[in-house]
Image: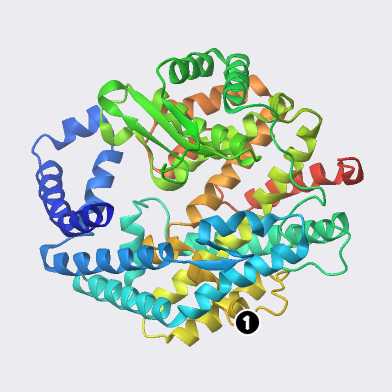
Amino acid sequence: ETKAESEYYDKIDPSMSEFSTRFAKVVVSSKYRDELVREWGRQYFNLLEMELKTFDPKIKEMLIEESKLKNEYTVLLASAKIPFKGETYNLTGLGPFHTDLDRGTRKSSYKARFSFFEENSKKLDNLYDQLVKLRHRMALELGYKNYIPLGYLKMSRSDYDAKAVAGYREQIVKHVVPLAGKLYQQRKDILNLEKLYFYDGINFPEGNPKPEGTPDELVAAAQKMYHELSSETGEFFDRMVNEKLLDLVNRKGKAGGGFCTSFPDYERPYIFANFNGTDHDVTVLTHEAGHAFQCYSSRKQQLVTYLWPTMESAEIHSMSMEFITWPWMERFFGDQAEKFRYMHMVNAVLFLPYGACVDHFQHWVYSNPDATPAERKERWSDLEKLYLPHRDYDDMSFPKSGGVWQGQLHIYQCPFYYIDYTLAQVCAMQFWIKFDQDHDAAWKDYLSLCQEGGSRPFSELVELAGLSSPFEEGTLKNVVGTIKNWFDEINVSKL
């Protein structure tokens, strides 16, 4: 049933795009446009104009083919049946072993994971090759030089381009990569290892801190926390609890993952997650609560389109909420709270170079659509040396040959949707700094950002929140400098 439903939507989605485009044409050419802009603001028309530049009936069949190929990738990864320690696992089921306290288990679990990708490497190469060439043909058909400008339009990026992103990536190399190197060195010392390998992804030899209490107790602690944070979050979270808008407990047959969605007619957000007894429970709860609070705060926006902002803006609220709630982590982790905060910041910093690497790789791929699968893997390996020079895959042939990116679904499914997470992370780090300096003023800025919803593009929302644009020269240098000072003040041996 699930497969049939997926195939049905793959088939009708381009037709829906065609209908949506016809509607957009009517609105943008309306004789009342000036009045509508005064009433609704410019962003709605920005979004419609970008949509009009991404679709034409002549690429409809190509879009159907693209959906089929993306679905093939999803099905292929979901089909994984990996033998490990006498059992059979899918890729998700193998995940917990990657952070096992036993180093041998971590290594062998990654070897098992990569064996699946190695066995299916030609299929994965072929799928991606077809997707890249198909997207390039679509771009040419619509009058673009290559897929990059079309990809940016599909991501609704109206206020920055590939050149700005390239400059931002350079700042990550200059300011973040050196700090990441120091953190990897610190991890090696904490774990008391002679050499740190890719599979040494744990932060402490005794394991990550775990939240104290049942799921119901964690929700109760969160409810108290949000009342203490502000009257707005208190009222919001009461409503989420009382109206049963939280589905957090893992159960048999339940879909995986965590997300936030909404029911616009009822002006209510909804949080879905799968608690598993790890620190991830607290992270996913605060992260999705950030999304939900933003949606709830913007519920009175005139247009449904404005309930949510564009991708890079949407993650600011969620990632910032993870940091905003730091002062209450003792409620969840007891005397392990400082250890959690350290781990949280380490992971936030280490993610930035990886996100930039994924983005740089995609820009190269779509600038060179005729590159061979071998050339793509070679390019990935070169970029790892630039962004992730501390990675060492030990004796694992598949990642050493440049294939590790094939497990990153965004690269196949959502071209260019990845740098967004890093842009939002840099903004969230700024909120962390602001809340430390002046909590009340920072909360006012955060609330204003949430209430604005998606009524403005990224750069305007960043300015509204009193933040510096990640694209601006000096932003990353200042943010990373503050974080480095914070790390310098921590006595890791006492965590």
Residue 337, picture quadrant: top right
Residue located 36% across and 59% down the image = 152
Residue indicated by mark 1: 397
Q: Is residue 493 visible?
A: yes
351, 454: nearer the viewer? 351
Q: In this rendered view, identify the residue nearer to me: 29 or 107.
A: 107
Residue 333, horizontal then vertical, whole percent: 73, 31
Q: Residue at point 22% right, 52% down? A: 5
Q: Kindly tell me whether residue 478 is visible in this rendering.
A: no
**176 lies above or below 443:** below
Q: Position of residue 329 (x, y in %)?
A: 70, 29
For this orientation, the residue located farthest to the front is 86
Q: Is 122 situated above or below 18?
A: below
- Quarter holding the C terminus is top right
Residue 450 in the image: x percent, y percent?
Answer: 46, 29
Dot 1, how many residues are within 10 Å of its Cα: few (below 14), some (14-19), or many (20+)?
Answer: some
Q: Secondary structure at mark 1?
A: helix
Amino acid identity at mark 1: Ser
70 relative position to 467: left or right: left
Q: Quadrant of residue 252?
A: top left
Give the residue drawn at x 35%, y 76%. Answer: 127
Q: Residue at x 8, y 38 (%)?
A: 31
Above or below for 440 versus 183: above
Picture colour scheme: rainbow
Number of numbered discs: 1
Q: Position of residue 474 (x, y in %)?
A: 65, 51
Q: In the figure, is residue 389 to the left or right of 283?
A: right
